[in-house]
Image: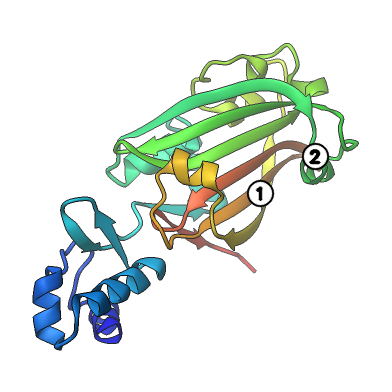
Amino acid sequence: MANELRTEILRGDLAPGDQLSSENELKDRFGVTRTTVRKGIALLRAEGLITSKQGKGAFVRERPHVNLRQTGSIYRARRGTGKSNFNAEAEAQGQKPKQVIREVVETAAPERVAELLGVEAGAPVVVRRLLQVSDETPMTLVDCYYDSAIAGGTRLAEARLIKGGANAYLEDPEGPIGRRIVQFIEDLNVRMPYPHEVDQLDIPDGVPVARVMRTAYDSAGDAVEVQDSIVPCDRHSFRYVIDV
């Protein structure tokens, strides 16, 4: 049963958002017991192909909502809108974005963040923790780290949203930092989510997350920001353009 339903989903016979037949209907269709049906549904859910809604049944998982496209020209075009990159990218794809500040604090730099920022492990850094939302769906947990020597006493250290986003503030030639960003380097790995990520991002069973560590470098080659993002893989697709 599970094999045939999997094939129908992957082939497109069952489209994203389609509801699967009821347990009784599947039982009759495949000539199996309800126990076998439930095991098959659980397997497909664990594989991330379907999701179950309490009292409503099982549905084919929707396709990703936002395509994260990473090129220099797109970054500059989004910056030119006067909005943060996430907001501008989501709006360009017909979504309604929102960003919520979870916390802004000075803390000791975690080892990996310190390595990327080029500071000593445990050195003071400012971290801005955000929740990015699109069409009322939680999309990403983002922790943005800055060397306290740069960010301390600036708006980056304040628990409020910054018009145009933090990168606009970093690059503002009339602002206190004035660093022109010329390069991003992203390190990405995929794993299953931790319990607190499941809760905050409302992640269904069987859906992995991508952890994206993005480091922004200025024209002098210095790291000015490290973004540590947790991205549910059922809500995003990634597209990179690499000019060689």
Q: Quadrant of the N terminus?
A: bottom left
Q: Is residue 26 left or right of residue 35?
A: left
Q: Quadrant of the C terminus?
A: bottom right
Where does the image place residue 26, in percent across and percent down from the top left? 14, 77
Q: Earlier in the sequence, mark 1 or mark 2?
A: 2
Residue 82 visible (yes or no): no
- As shown in the figure, which amino acid type bears the numbered disc 2? Leu
Task: State how far apart marks 1 and 2 are (Cα).
Answer: 11 Å
Q: Is residue 98 left or right of residue 213?
A: left
In this view, 155 is above or below 75: above
| Picture quadrant of residue 149 | top right
The residue nearer to you, when weighing 200 against 14, is 200
Please give the name of the residue rendered at 69% of the width and 14% of the height, measured from the top-left corner.
154
Please give the name of the residue rendered at 48% of the width and 38% of the height, measured from the top-left corner.
85
Residue 218 visible (yes or no): yes
Where does the image place residue 66, in percent across and percent down from the top left? 38, 51
Kind of element beneath mark 2: helix
| Picture quadrant of residue 166 | top right
Where does the image place residue 39, in percent across and percent down from the top left? 31, 74
Please give the name of the residue rendered at 56% of the width and 38% of the height, measured from the top-left corner.
142
Residue designated by label 2 = 117
In this view, 143 is above or below 124: below
Q: Residues within 10 Å of mark 2 (few under 14, many from 20)?
A: many
Residue extending farthest top: 153
